[in-house]
Amino acid sequence: MIKNTIEVKDLKFQYRNGDFSLRLSEFCVEESEKVAIIGPSGTGKTTLLNLLAGCCLPDNGSVMIQETDIVSMSDLARRKFRICNIGMIFQEFELLDHLNVLDNILLPYRITPYLIYGGSVLERAAFLAKEVGLEDKIKRNVRQLSQGERQRVAVCRSLLPEPSLLLCDEPTGNLDPANSKHVMNIMFKYTEDHGSTLVSVTHDHDNARRFDRTVEFS
């Protein structure tokens, strides 16, 4: 029986210092499903990803991830759950500019005791960098990279811990068509090989057609 990786019900959220609010009566994503979220800017797509990851909490409603109620968790438990189970690609990449490409990819293992660093992790980081065409820049400081290259570093970092859920905010927004297709191929292959679930915000309708399902925000 296929279970829901994500199950949101009666969600209400409003930023404390703004007029924007998000209301969602129900949002469910099945295990191993690939879902694209599309819609105009300002409709709450990024906010939804942050709520699913537990980066922010709703005012009302439930957010179940892998049958775990992340709303009722302590902040520490939520952080542990997120880093062990969720890979995130942020719209602004969130790279550390004083680190090189390799160290940015390895960052999840450097900031928490819940992921165990070993030689296989380093090998996987190098493999991912090669997969996205950054093998010759692995020791380069990320400040020296183009926006598209920085985005590919963020993709590698999200895949390194082998998460069961990928939450992506415009993961190919700064890539040319060839690199966009290549990165999406890598992400789709990863989800298929690992049985992982993928939820991605995108404005690229060509990419959106490749997903199992599209949800439109308006």
Image (tube, rainbow, N blue to C red):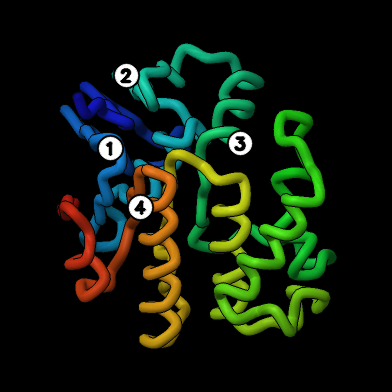
Crowdedness near tag 1: few (<14), some (14–19) or many (≥20) residues, C-alpha within 10 Å: some
Residue 217 lies left or right of residue 155; in this view the side is left
Contact, mark 3 vs mark 4 (Cβ under 8 Å): no
Q: Measure the C-alpha gap from mark 3 to mark 4.
A: 21 Å
Is residue 36 placed above or below 110 in the rendered structure?
Answer: below
Mark nearer the viewer, 3 or 1: 3
Give the amino acid type for the residue marked by disc 3 in the picture: Ile
Residue 18 lies left or right of residue 55; in this view the side is left
Across and down, in percent, residue 98 comes to 84, 65
Across and down, in percent, residue 200 comes to 34, 55
- For mark 1, what is the residue? 22
**Image quarter of the N terminus:** top left
Mark nearer the viewer, 4 or 1: 4
- Helix, strand or loop at disc 3? helix
State which tag comes first along the sequence, 4 or 1: 1
Contact, mark 4 vs mark 2 (Cβ under 8 Å): no
Q: Measure the C-alpha gap from mark 4 to mark 2.
A: 28 Å
State which tag comes first along the sequence, 3 or 1: 1
